Amino acid sequence: MVVTGGLGPTPDDLTRYAVADVLGVELVTDEAALTDVRRCFERMGRSMPAGNEVQALIPQGAEVLPNARGTAPGIVWEQDERMLAVLPGVPEEMRAMFETALRPRLARRAGASPYHRIVLQTFGMSEADIGTALRDLMDRDRNPLVGTTAKRGTIGIRILARGVTESEARALAEADAQEVRRRLGRAVFGEGDTTLEQAVGAILKKRGLTLATAESCTGGWLAKRITDTPGSSAYFLGGVVTSAHAQKTAWLDVPTSILREHGAVSEPVAAAMAGGCRERFGSDTALATTGIAGPGGATNSKPVGLVYVAFANASGVEVKELRLGEHWGREGIRDRTCSIALNLLRLRLSSDPNP
Amino acid sequence: MVVTGGLGPTPDDLTRYAVADVLGVELVTDEAALTDVRRCFERMGRSMPAGNEVQALIPQGAEVLPNARGTAPGIVWEQDERMLAVLPGVPEEMRAMFETALRPRLARRAGASPYHRIVLQTFGMSEADIGTALRDLMDRDRNPLVGTTAKRGTIGIRILARGVTESEARALAEADAQEVRRRLGRAVFGEGDTTLEQAVGAILKKRGLTLATAESCTGGWLAKRITDTPGSSAYFLGGVVTSAHAQKTAWLDVPTSILREHGAVSEPVAAAMAGGCRERFGSDTALATTGIAGPGGATNSKPVGLVYVAFANASGVEVKELRLGEHWGREGIRDRTCSIALNLLRLRLSSDPNP
């Protein structure tokens, strides 16, 4: 059983008391945990407030799970087949603690049957089309088990193989991974937790190319995603975010005549933004976005979800028109625009010999 | 009971079958749901793949919960005191469906005792310090119940009052909210779901001021957060993301001599970035960030987590040095830098009569 939240220092943080109650034991101060909480504050250059001492209280007989990201230590209690784990509620702390402290413990308990897991990440095919392409592989009685997980346009293919030995399981999983790659072709962009921006970064790095961005509707999110990757400054020179017409002209040399004639959300403006960005930054490649993310801003001819993404390199400029509709909302439209732009760059770079 | 996930169109999406099994009923096609799935594809300008038809299958006697964000309709089944709800696993779809379709249904079922809920959002005080300041209000036997929720540096204060009547509950909650505001002062920046960027946007809009951003370590995230708010183009002129020294000079007029003498991660460079940004965009205010988000890039004198945020307006430039440590990781450091920058702007604008 896994419980999350309520491990903080305030009076409404009652989880430790409830757990001690259920287990029928006292709460005791764990000295190592107390030191950890204190150190966490020291790292921030502060001394620990007295209120945080309760965070080192754990039920007698339980163990502490260290928290690498915050002050609340986790708690784990095991007896025979039973296990109770308490993780902090702050999502980033919970995730980190699950991965580093709880998952290995669960795997050890599960023990037994060797397995091997491969995840392939795809972009550009719908989940239903992938389901059709992989129907026989996804049969529920098969080994490996193949499944899909959709997350904002990115669809992951999970391959879980069991074997008598670890190496048999690995061979089975790898054979399936190869078959999935063959069937889905260029839709596959990476393995494991790889993100589109990491895949794009790896291609740029390998080919020694640089990138710059010019964003209107995505407002900096594209640059943010690219710079999520440590070391991205090796290939990402920078970006510009512009909203008004005048800023697009001042920062990206988009001709005022084009803006007047076609409006900011148009194919020619997207192309001019990408070209101007590449020129101004002196980068090998550039991406641009302009669109109507909503909920306001639509006109008769330009609905919410109408977006243009543009890619520029030495071969010229390519623009893609997207009609994303409005049902994903502002966040979904902006997020997918970033992904589609990154994917455009990925596909162009893997087929274009030009830098 | 609420179950999430496994409502997609691929063969590994087994939840509907499991639910029908448990309820001991057949799956039947819900025509309204089928129309919804079909419309969802039409909105994207595509026709529905045959594989998606299964998404309209629901257990006999159950009802459909419409999905505003994607193709998978939810399922709800009720009998006397028992209720089983199945929501899609895609987080954005799940959240939207919970809010629009499930929460009101649960509230109706819960019925009875009138209550009123107020949430106040704070930034800049630790959870422990807030716990100390509100200790008596957070007593668990009290009405209203007062609690805190921490999320990446932002701490929400939840006030839940029960009363004989709705208006009595509201009066109790409002009295507590007033007391919390009195005790926490300027740390409170908004109510409900208000984010820091929305609070900042509201202040800028009210005072008729414009903003521009210059980002190094946050790489566009600050601009992204500001533009999350619809209509932000009314006050946000745009932003620049720069990584290399040369780009800081080219785009923001940061003197090369300062970069050479102090390095890019320094107080004078942060100040020059904010000042240059304000100048170049012609904005009333500007924010700048420069720092070491890690995991690489640290030196002996400049550890991971060392960040400078700067605010510029007509009164001059103010720089804040942050030592965030490395335990939050790259994402946590970048995220908190954005929040601290936004909070700096908020505090300056609420105390500075100058534009």
Image (spheres, coloured by chain):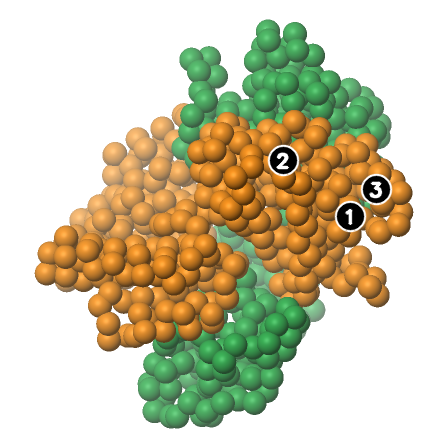
Chain colours: A green, B orange
Q: Secondary structure at mark 1?
A: helix
Residues A10 and A214: in front is: A10
Q: Are marks 1 and 2 in contact (CB under 8 Å)?
A: no
Single out the mark in the foreground, 1 or 2.
2
Whole-number angstrom distance, CA of label 3 to CA of label 1: 14 Å
Residue B44 picture location, percent across and down? 45, 27
The chain ID associated with circle 3 is B
With respect to residue A335, does B98 lie above or below? below
Q: How many marks do you count on the picture?
A: 3
Kindly identify the amino acid type of the residue bearing the numbered disc 1. Pro
Which residue bears the numbered disc 2?
A: B314
Residues A73 and A181: in front is: A73
Q: Residues within 10 Å of mark 2 (few under 14, many from 20)?
A: few
Which residue bears the numbered disc 1?
A: B268
Q: Quadrant of residue B47?
A: top left
Whole-number angstrom distance, CA of label 1 to CA of label 2: 18 Å
Q: Secondary structure at mark 3?
A: helix
